[in-house]
Amino acid sequence: MSQDASFEDGAEKPLRLKGETAEDVTVISSLAQDAVFPMAEMSWKPAQRRFALLLNRFRWEDLPAAERRGRDFERVRAVLAFDDVTKVSSSGLDRSDPEMVLSLLAIKWDAGDDGAGRFELTLAGDGAIALEAECVNITFQDVTRPYVAPSRKSPKHPE
C-alpha cells in the first residue's frame, strides 16, 4: 500500500491508498468504517468495470492526535473505487430513494480458487452490496480537506 499524496500547501496530507491484497482490504475497511453516503453517490460503470462510492468518512487515523490535543474530530470526503468488477448486486436497499443515506460498516474480500472473488460491503440496517471481481484492485483517496464533524463526536462502537 502507498500513501503518497499531499495537498498543494503541504499543510495536511490526504489519505491515498491502493489495495491489491486481502490484507489491504482489511486496512481500507477499517479506515472506511462508519463512512456515510447517499445512494445517489454510488456509481457502477460496467464498460469500465468500475464501481465507486463518494464517501463522507471519519478520519480514524487522526483520532489519537485529536484526543491528545483536545481538538474536534474530523471528517473528509473520499472516493472508494473498485476496479476489475464484473458484476454488482445488492440486498436490503430501497433503490427507489436515491437520497437515502447509507452507512458503510465493513468491506470483506472472499477469494475464489482462480484469484477472482467477491467483495461484500456491509451496510447498517442489514443492507449489503456484492461485487464480483477478477482480483483485488481498490483505490481509496481523500478528495477534500478535513472538516470538523457537525456533532464534534467520533463514532462509538460497543466494546
Image: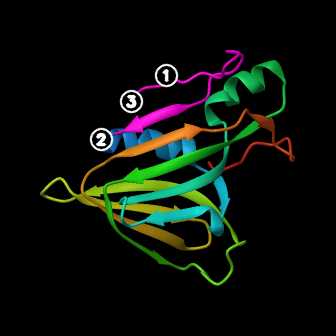
Given residues 114 and 70, the one toward you in this image is 114
First in sequence: mark 2 vs mark 3: 3
Does residue 33 sit above or below 85 in this rendering? above
Seen at 45% across and 54% down, the residue is 107
Seen at 34% across and 54% down, the residue is 109
First in sequence: mark 1 vs mark 2: 1
Q: Where does residue 62 sit, x and y in percent of width and height?
A: 67, 28
Callout 2, which amino acid? Thr
Given residues 91 and 11, the one toward you in this image is 11
Disc 3 element: loop
Residue 21 numbered tag: 2
The image quarter in which residue 84 lies: bottom left
Does residue 20 sit above or below 70 in this rendering? below
The residue identified by callout 1 is: 4
Majority SS type along the magenta span: loop
* The magenta segment: 2-19
Callout 3, which amino acid? Met
Separation of residues labelled 3 and 1 (CA atoms) = 10 Å
Does residue 47 sit above or below 67 in this rendering? below
The residue identified by callout 3 is: 1
Magenta region includes residue 24:
no
